[in-house]
Amino acid sequence: MAFSATFWGVRGTIPCPSSTHMRFGGNTSCVEVTAGDHTIILDCGTGFRALGKDLISRTTRRATILLSHFHLDHIAGFPFFQPAYKPDFSFRIMAGRFNACPDIRSVLATQMDPPLFPVPMRTMRADLTFEDFRPGDTLTLDGGLTVRTAVLNHPDGACGYRIDHEGHSLAYVTDTEHVPDAPDRNILELIDGADLVIYDATYTEKEFACKAGWGHSTWVEGIKLCQSAGARRLALFHHEPDHDDTGMEEIEAEAQSVWSSVFAAREGETVTLE
């Protein structure tokens, strides 16, 4: 049965609604995964809004939403997700809970409270359930689909995911900061043999040298990890806002000169795992 990933938002940090960012996209993180009868949504960045409009036109009425973490660029689309306001939709919303971090429902509700937003979360009429878990746990979704999780190196904590379906696998690894010359064992185990790895490639090597502690990685590290773990393909993700279309094309070409199995994720693109 079908196993695919559609990119609804590929940008990091802040949306970039500019003519110079159209070919790769300016919306922040949101990826829709279809695994047979299951719909899994990875993060609720501003790309979540367009996904919601598309869902309304389909027969799909149930989905699981997995959040990597609660930084604004990964949850900003939630208040604008039209299906959440309709009673015939049902969403299971899950996120890893780190020490001293509020629960998922509190975080999403707070960004919709005055003075931040005029419409409170209680106006959402869909069936919404909120579940916190311990990062590193294996999750069991409806129908027995399993999702492995891993702790990532990011300020305030972040969680990576691996979805396995009928012999194929997808790993979502954003946001994370690597330690030079010390491959992250959590990531290596999560992406081992994966068909597709979606990886935080926010910075170039030159930029990374000036951004220690900011919580992001590079395409160079992504390739190293994928090759070490025997992953088949790498999607560069969480694009730096200052990387316009021309810059992204240059980054993609340079990465492909090192490894032909890498590409830069583009908003609207669907990748089928087979």
Image (cartoon, helix red, strand yellow):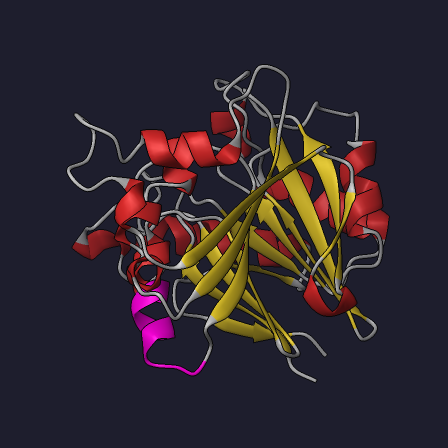
Residue at (76%, 43%) from the top-left corner?
A: 225
Magenta segment boundaries in residue numbering:
51-59
Q: Is residue 80 visible?
A: yes
Residue 74 placement (x, y as % from top left): 43, 41
Specify whether residue 13 is in view: no
Quarter occupied by the C terminus: bottom right
Give the camera-side residue of 44 and 140.
Answer: 140
Residue at screen point 70% across, 85% down: 1
Taking 13 as reference, is 88 above or below it?
A: below
> What percent of the width, then of the height, locates residue 93?
53, 49
Q: Where 47 falls versus 3 (above or below)?
A: above
Along the horizontal axis of the image, is 15 left or right of 154?
Answer: left
By secondary structure, the bulk of the magenta-drawn segment is best described as helix
Judging depth in this view, the residue of 149 and 56 nearest the camera is 56
> 80 or 230: which is nearer to us?
80
Q: Is residue 93 left or right of residue 121?
A: right
Q: Is residue 213 magenta?
A: no
Residue 220 pos. (x, y %): 64, 41
Please say whether residue 55 is one of the residues in the magenta stretch: yes
The picture places residue 266, in percent across and down from the top left corner, at 42, 62
Residue visible at 71% across and 34% down in the picture:
135
Q: Residue at x 84, y 43 (%)?
A: 189
Up-down: is 201 above or below 273? above
Q: Nearer the viewer, residue 69 or 103?
A: 103
